Image (cartoon, rainbow, N blue to C red):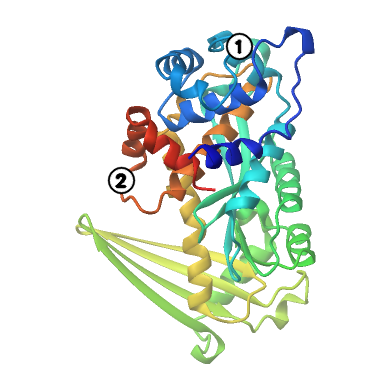
């Protein structure tokens, strides 16, 4: 495993150390490696990280330079607060490129997440808001970009994120926040297709699409349809996906637009039934089953990324907020989530995998070898 761990470390040696040379007691490589291993093993704060490293001191000494001992919790906190997130992203993206094998038709879901307790009211600092990309088929977080949280800045973050990604021959999905002509054009320019959720932020267009699908005289020959039914936990959910390429009435207003879609969800719990319709714009040709696949894949970013980060990594409880620390720690969590997802041989939960990593150095070494 020695070679595999050195290969893993190599992805992060390109990161520029922000510290003054004469004040470096510990190499940046050592600090980052201990941090990755700690978060993989369930560590949630800097004090826990120092204690974890002390219990594994001999093991860590085999892989990184510890001639000055284990860094203190203050050192971990200080380094992550100083480290430019763009530098950390370089290492993260370098690692992603080594493990991510893009497939044609891959769905890349782009969505935002707020780390709720990362705010500092005393300094007038709001909570950290991130926009991130999720590769549905590969189950990997591909990149993250900080947003200030307001609508305009989130759109800017999405644009920046697209610039970091190879979306050629992929399907990019976004919620209503990303439903803009400029966004559709950027995805098309980069060789990708899009499925964009259409809501009230598009005003007249939303009403036009809604009216189109609500027309009782709409002939079945004008659209393709696909249905699914799911049952479980006392709930029945039927979804009907419809997709039409008869969009001459839209006057070619959107780059690459080929179809409009509608999803009707009918949920029954006991004797209560609710019905909801959602609308979409897409550059995909008419194929309701393909559209359904993209929409379902987009929902995964909530279940397989955001929910896991909050439940397994307790991200929403994190109060780390000094300078760049919250953003760097968020990226560290996503890196370790990706590593855990790479272990496809095990059907264990994320929580169990993290406990095993803390109990068994050999399992931790195995995870780090999944390059």
Picture residue at 52% right of the left edge, 23% below the top: 117
Q: CA distance from mark 2 to mark 1?
A: 34 Å
Horizontal side of 367 relative to 129 (left or right) equals left
Quickly name the residue at label 2.
348
Say which of 84 and 173 sits in front.
84
- Tell me what residue is drawn at x 44 percent, y 37 percent: 365
Mark 1 crowdedness (10 Å alpha carbons): few <14, some 14-19, many ≥20: some
Q: Nearer the viewer, residue 75 or 330?
A: 75
Q: Is residue 148 visible?
A: no
Q: Considering the numbered disc 1 on the image, is that residue within a helix, a strand or a loop?
A: helix
Callout 2: 10 Å neighbours few (<14), some, many (20+)? few
Q: Which quarter of the picture shows residue 228?
A: bottom left
Locate residue 370, reporting x and y percent. 49, 47
Which residue is depicted at the point 51% across and 58% down? Answer: 138
User: Sequence-wise, which precedes: disc 2 or disc 1?
Assistant: 1
Q: Is residue 181 left or right of residue 292?
A: right
Q: Position of residue 123 (x, y in %)?
A: 67, 12
Q: Is residue 205 visible?
A: yes
**Vertically, is 183 above or below 156?**
below
Q: Is residue 48 above or below residue 211?
A: above
**Circle 1 is placed at which residue position?**
75
Q: Position of residue 219 (x, y in %)?
A: 52, 89
Q: How many marks?
A: 2
Which residue lies most toward the bottom here? 221
Figure quadrant of residue 132: top right
């Amino acid at each position: 495993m020695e070679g595999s761990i050195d290969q893993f470390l190599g992805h992060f040696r390109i990161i520029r150390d922000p510290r003054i040379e004469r004040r470096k007691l510990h190499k940046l490589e050592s600090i980052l490696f201990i941090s990755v291993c700690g978060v993989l093993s369930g560590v949630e704060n800097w004090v826990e990280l120092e204690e974890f490293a002390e219990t594994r001191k001999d093991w860590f000494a085999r892989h990184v330079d510890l001639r000055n001992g284990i860094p203190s919790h203050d050192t971990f906190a200080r380094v992550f607060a100083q480290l430019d997130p763009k530098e950390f992203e370089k290492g993260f993206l370098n690692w992603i490129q080594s493990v991510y094998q893009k497939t044609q038709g891959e769905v890349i879901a782009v969505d935002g997440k707020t780390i709720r307790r990362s705010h500092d009211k005393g300094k007038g600092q709001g909570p950290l808001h991130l926009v991130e990309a999720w590769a549905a088929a590969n189950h990997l977080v591909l990149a993250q970009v900080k947003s200030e949280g307001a609508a305009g800045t989130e759109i800017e973050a999405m644009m920046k994120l697209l610039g970091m990604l190879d979306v050629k021959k992929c399907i990019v999905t976004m919620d209503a926040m990303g439903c803009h002509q400029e966004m559709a054009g950027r995805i098309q320019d980069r060789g990708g297709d899009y499925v964009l959720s259409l809501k009230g932020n598009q005003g007249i267009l939303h009403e036009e699409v809604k009216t189109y699908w609500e027309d009782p005289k709409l002939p079945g020959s004008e659209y393709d349809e696909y249905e699914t039914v799911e049952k479980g936990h006392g709930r029945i959910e039927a979804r009907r996906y419809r997709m039409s390429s008869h969009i001459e009435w839209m006057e070619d207003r959107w780059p690459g637009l080929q179809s409009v879609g509608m999803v009707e969800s009918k949920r029954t719990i006991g004797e209560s039934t609710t019905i909801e319709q959602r609308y979409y714009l897409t550059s995909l040709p008419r194929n309701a089953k393909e559209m359904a696949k993209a929409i379902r894949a987009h929902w995964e970013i909530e279940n397989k990324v955001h929910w896991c980060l909050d439940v397994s990594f307790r991200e929403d409880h994190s109060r780390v907020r000094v300078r760049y620390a919250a953003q760097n720690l968020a990226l560290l969590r996503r890196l370790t989530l990706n590593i855990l997802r790479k272990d496809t041989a095990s059907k264990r939960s994320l929580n169990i995998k993290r406990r095993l990593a803390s109990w068994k150095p050999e399992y931790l070494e195995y995870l780090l070898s999944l390059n």
